[in-house]
Image (cartoon, rainbow, N blue to C red):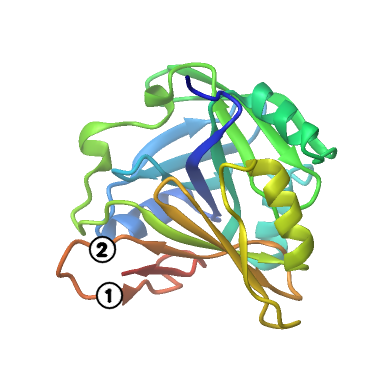
Amino acid sequence: MTDESALRSLDHVVIAVHDLDRSIADYRSLGFTVNPGGRHPGRSSHNALIVFADGAYIELIAWQAAAPEERWWRLLQSRGEGFVDFALLPGDTAAAIDAARARGLATIIGPVEGGRVRPDGMALQWRTARQASHDLPFLCGDVTARNLRVPEGEARQHPNGVSGVAGLSIAVQDVGVSVERYRALLGPAVAVTISSRGAQSAQASFLLGSTRFTLVATTQDEGPSHMTLTNPVGASPRTLSIATSHGAAIDIT
């Protein structure tokens, strides 16, 4: 029997950009297939998706008007373009929230209704949940079918051959504290292990789906800091230009 409270995999990683059309063109020049996403009702944001064969995707998001009430927009203004957040995919958002609260994550907020209207007019709906601190991801569970939100088929094939997200590093202020939060969020089925404990070099990691997540100690802002994508067999590793990736530190290995 499927545990609907379980978190299944990385859903997506969010990169905030100033100009969506330019970022689409730049990522296409890097060999990615970029799919127009649409607009978010009641907000000034619009997006595009880079979807991989493993089901995870990169969301490129930009705003057509100022949105000071939104944290991602504020981060874009204060830090410039780059990673601002990431989401995990729950079996059921409400069940995942209840389970996390039962394990001690009392400050998780949700479910919150959300949605997007695709360029073809299709209205999508989802439910999210978010922890008060920014070391943890948000949850994004679909109400409409996920394949309407996350395209399949040719949309997941890329001229550069990339097939998925192998790893994601998350900057956290206190690895020990964050580990306990992740254990409460993920539950006992996912092993979160501390690999080093130095004040400046503390790290912990866990595997969810096909993605390895690594928590890395920082004195800077918390959140995703580096992503590793899966290279085709036999291809040489490379690091994407920060200018072309719009501030996101991405390796293809």
- Secondary structure at numbered mark 1: loop
Report the side of 68 relative to 5 (left or right). right
Contact (Cβ within 8 Å) of mark 2 with mark 1: yes
Residue type at mark 2: give it.
Asn
- Residue 28 position within the rendered picture, expressed as x and y whole percent measured from the top left: 29, 55
Q: Which mark is residue 237?
A: 1
Please name the residue shown 82% across and 40% down the image. 104
Question: Is 64 drawn above or below residue 204 in the view shown?
Answer: above
Residue 112, horizontal then vertical, whole percent = 71, 25
Residue 70 appearing in the image: yes
The extreme left residue here reads 234
Give the label on residue 231, or none.
Answer: 2
Placement of the C terminus among the 4 image quadrants: bottom left
Mark 2 and mark 1 lie on one chain; the one further toward the N terminus is 2
Give amino acid for label 1. Answer: Pro
Question: Is any atom of residue 81 visible in this view?
Answer: no
Local packing at callout 2 (Cα closer than 10 Å; few below 14, some 14-19, many 20+) is many
